[in-house]
């Protein structure tokens, strides 16, 4: 890993010194924009309901223009809660920016697959149901040279309670009562040698992040995770782009957690209140054993990488992916629009075609022994305020999915 990192940095530095790149537009836009969208949801094991998203980019204070962005999500139905976010708060304009946010949920859920291998059955999972979930985070970034170099730190605190385990159809397997609480921190830097931070058409971007996961208790592992996110942008035709991304994340365990399977099974059993299912308890204990032994480097699936798979579909101590995307820019004309629920200035409209492949493993030597691929097409609407409205249709070995989100793919906290 160390040798590869040195080679990677040499490649990036050679690209940086090969030619000068000038920004195409203002990197601290202050054009005001907003959107309001309904968010109906159906989450297996958690329920259904309705939410509303409100977002405001570059919020002005009277005649003073700023880069402050505000977001709020209110959720009703079986899952009650809210999320409040503020980003790019100018502690020192164009130099020091602060992000912060918090969220509260009465109920939530996530999938736990029965094994961590890439050849696992997509339907072989259980749903972990959470209650009383809370999180709070802060992120501070120092940005220099017209946002071409950033140093950032990110801290978060999470608290939740595991209340039930359900099957893939949402039917109760057993009830539980297990509380979790922990802090995590990440630090890193970003080199953005491109012609535009929001909508790059040429250049290279490298994001390095190191995160710390200290042991939450005497049974938990103590480990760190280092990740590298490298993207090249090659101009095509007059103002279109071919983007290539490589991502690598890996956990290094400083101290293993408890790997005694009998003990972990007994510990999982102790959290069960009723309808205890021994097979499911053993599966969860084996997953905990693997994490205690190797750590967790992240996952694949969702809106960023391997887009045709559900979020968190594949996870492991070691993660690697690569992808390519052709962004055919049909227009770079600035067009104002105001449709009551959304207001902004369109600066680009694109069709996109993409291909991705990825792998996860618990050991570095096992990476790419198994891999999964994803391909698809979509559209992007780039705006002056900083929103990128992305609609993707992706297909892979486990079916198709449609994604609607407000940013380009392959992102990290550093962007």
Image: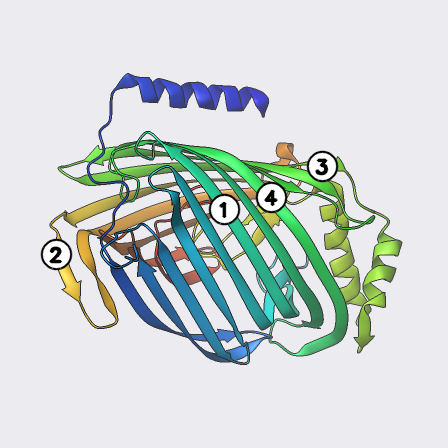
Point 66% across, 41% down: residue: 362
Report crowding for label 2: few under 14, some 14 to 19, many 20 or more residues within 10 A (C-alpha): few
Q: Is mark 2 on a helix, strand or loop?
A: strand
Q: Residues within 10 Å of mark 3 (few under 14, many from 20)?
A: many
Q: Which residue lies under the disc numbered 2?
A: 335
Q: Distance between the residues labelled 1 and 2?
A: 33 Å
The mark that comes first in sequence, 1 or 2, is 1
- Helix, strand or loop at mark 3: strand
Residue 22 lies left or right of residue 376; in this view the side is: left
User: Which residue is tagged 4?
Assistant: 185
Q: Which one is closest to the eye, mark 1 or mark 4?
A: 1
Earlier residue among tags 4 and 2: 4
> Would you place residue 382 above or below residue 111 in this image?
above
Please indicate, yes or no, whether residue 18 appears anywhere in the rendered image.
Answer: yes
Q: Where is residue 212 in the image (x, y as percent from the top left)?
A: 64, 40
Q: Residue at x 76, y 72 (%)?
A: 176
Front in this rendered view, residue 361 or 34: 34
Mark 4 and mark 2: Cα distance apart in space: 41 Å
Q: What element carries label 4?
A: strand
- Which residue bears the numbered disc 1? 139
Q: Nearer the viewer, mark 4 or mark 2?
A: 4
Give the side of residue 169 with respect to residue 385, left or right: right
First along the sequence among labels 1 and 3: 1
Which numbered mark, 1 or 3, is in the foreground of this view? 1
> Marks 1 and 3, how far apart in space?
25 Å
Give the numbered dot on residue 253.
Answer: 3
């Amino acid at each position: 890993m160390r040798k590869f990192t040195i080679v990677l940095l040499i490649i990036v530095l050679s690209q940086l010194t090969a030619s000068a790149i000038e920004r195409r537009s203002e990197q601290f836009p202050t054009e005001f924009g907003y959107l309001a969208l309904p968010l109906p949801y159906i989450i297996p094991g958690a329920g259904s309901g309705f939410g509303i998203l409100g977002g405001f980019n570059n919020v002005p204070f009277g005649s003073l223009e700023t880069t402050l962005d505000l977001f709020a999500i209110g959720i009703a139905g079986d899952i009650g809660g809210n999320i409040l976010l503020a980003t790019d708060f100018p502690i020192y304009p164009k130099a020091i920016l602060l992000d912060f946010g918090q969220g509260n949920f009465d109920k939530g859920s996530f999938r736990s697959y029965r094994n961590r291998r890439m050849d696992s059955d997509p339907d072989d999972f259980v749903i972990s149901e959470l209650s009383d979930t809370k999180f709070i985070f802060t992120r501070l970034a120092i940005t220099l040279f017209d946002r071409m170099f950033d140093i950032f730190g990110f801290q978060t605190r999470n608290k939740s309670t595991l209340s039930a385990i359900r099957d893939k159809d949402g039917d109760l397997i057993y009830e539980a009562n297990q509380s979790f609480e922990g802090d995590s921190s990440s630090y890193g830097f970003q080199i953005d040698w491109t012609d535009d931070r929001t909508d790059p058409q040429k250049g290279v971007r490298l994001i390095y992040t190191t995160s710390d996961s200290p042991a939450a208790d005497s049974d938990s592992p103590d480990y760190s995770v280092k990740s590298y996110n490298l993207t090249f942008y090659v101009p095509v035709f007059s103002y279109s782009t071919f983007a290539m991304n490589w991502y690598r994340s890996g956990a290094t365990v400083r101290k293993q957690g408890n790997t005694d399977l009998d003990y972990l099974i007994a510990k999982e059993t102790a959290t069960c209140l009723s309808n205890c299912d021994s097979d499911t308890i053993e599966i969860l204990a084996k997953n905990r054993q693997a994490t205690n032994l190797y750590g967790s480097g992240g996952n694949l699936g969702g809106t960023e990488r391997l887009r045709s798979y559900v979020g968190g579909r594949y996870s492991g101590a070691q993660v690697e992916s690569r992808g390519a995307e052709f962004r055919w820019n049909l227009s770079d004309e600035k067009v104002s629009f105001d449709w009551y629920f959304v207001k902004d200035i369109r600066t680009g409209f694109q069709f996109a075609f993409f291909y991705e492949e990825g792998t996860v493993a618990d050991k570095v030597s096992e990476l790419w022994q198994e891999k999964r691929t994803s391909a698809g097409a979509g559209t992007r609407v780039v705006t002056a305020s900083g929103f990128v409205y992305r609609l993707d249709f992706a297909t892979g070995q486990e079916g198709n999915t449609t994604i609607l989100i407000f940013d380009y793919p392959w992102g990290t906290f550093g962007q």
